Image: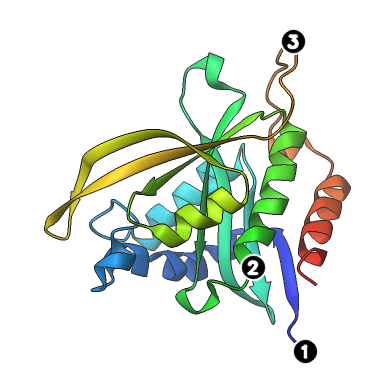
Amino acid sequence: MNSLRLRLAEDEDAPALLEIYRPYVESPDFSVSDTSFEYEAPSLEEWRERMAAIRRVFPYLVIEENARPVGYAYGHSYRERAAYHGCVEVTVYLEQEATGRGLGRILYAGLEEILCSMGIVNAYACITAHNEASLAFHRALGYKLCGSFPKSGFKNGHYIDMVWLAKQLAPYPPMLGPLQRVCDLERAHLEAILAAAAAGKR
């Protein structure tokens, strides 16, 4: 029986998550490597630093099958100005062999619920315009097109259009309170969210 677990990322996850990400940067299949606008995958040291910076404030989730990480998702700052504190950009990556099986939905279910607990009201996803699978995935979860940036990237010998999709995660309060960091939330509350999201697959 396949064992599935959704959890918060830990320091020791860095090597496995970097290898999940690497093909989206360096694959000879441009339909894959066009996904990221980096030309080279980061070093493990830089990857650890990126993870640490995100995890100080936002949720960084890992999904495991049979105790092995096969995907991850996280939220990060949409913009640095203070008035944007109710917004977040979301990112998700899965092993190529793990796509199309509902694991991204589980990751986003947990991620969005935690973001709501932090006081986030808007989520944005930035996607290459020809990535039909990712666009369909986000649209199925309620994300809607809100912006298009033609030929904003150049990689693998061609220009790439980018689109932004948006989703309202929670009702807009009359006064938006301060953002709570994920580390400020009770661990039991986080674990309950993650368990419920993982159970939704079964």
Query: For mark 2, what is the residue?
Result: 102
Find numbered disc 3 in the image and state the secondary structure of the residue it sits on.
loop
Report the side of 19 relative to 5 (left or right): left
Q: Nearer the viewer, mark 2 or mark 1?
A: 2
Local SS, label 2: loop
The residue shown at (74%, 25%) is 171
Q: Residue 199, position in %: x, y?
A: 82, 66
Three-letter code, disc 2:
Gly
Left or right: residue 35 compared with residue 48: left
Which amino acid type corresponds to the residue marked 1 in the rendered image?
A: Met
| Res. 109 visible in picture | yes
Residue 129 position, x and y percent, is 34, 49
Q: Residue at x 57, y 28 (%)?
A: 87
Where the C terminus falls, by quadrant? bottom right
Q: Quadrant of the N terminus?
A: bottom right
Left or right for 15, reference 42: right
Q: Residue at x 22, y 45 (%)?
A: 153
Quadrant assignment, res 24: bottom left
Instruction: Categorize mark 2 by other alpha carbons within 10 Å: few (<14), some (14-19), many (20+).
Output: few
- On the image, the x and y values in percent for residue 135 come to 46, 53
Between the C-alphas of marks 2 and 1, the distance is 17 Å
Query: 78 or 131, which is in the foreground?
Result: 131
Tell which of 170 and 139 is nearer to you.
Answer: 139
Q: Residue at x 55, y 72 (%)?
A: 100
Name which residue type carries label 3.
Pro
Residue at the limit of the structure toward the bottom, as seen here: 1
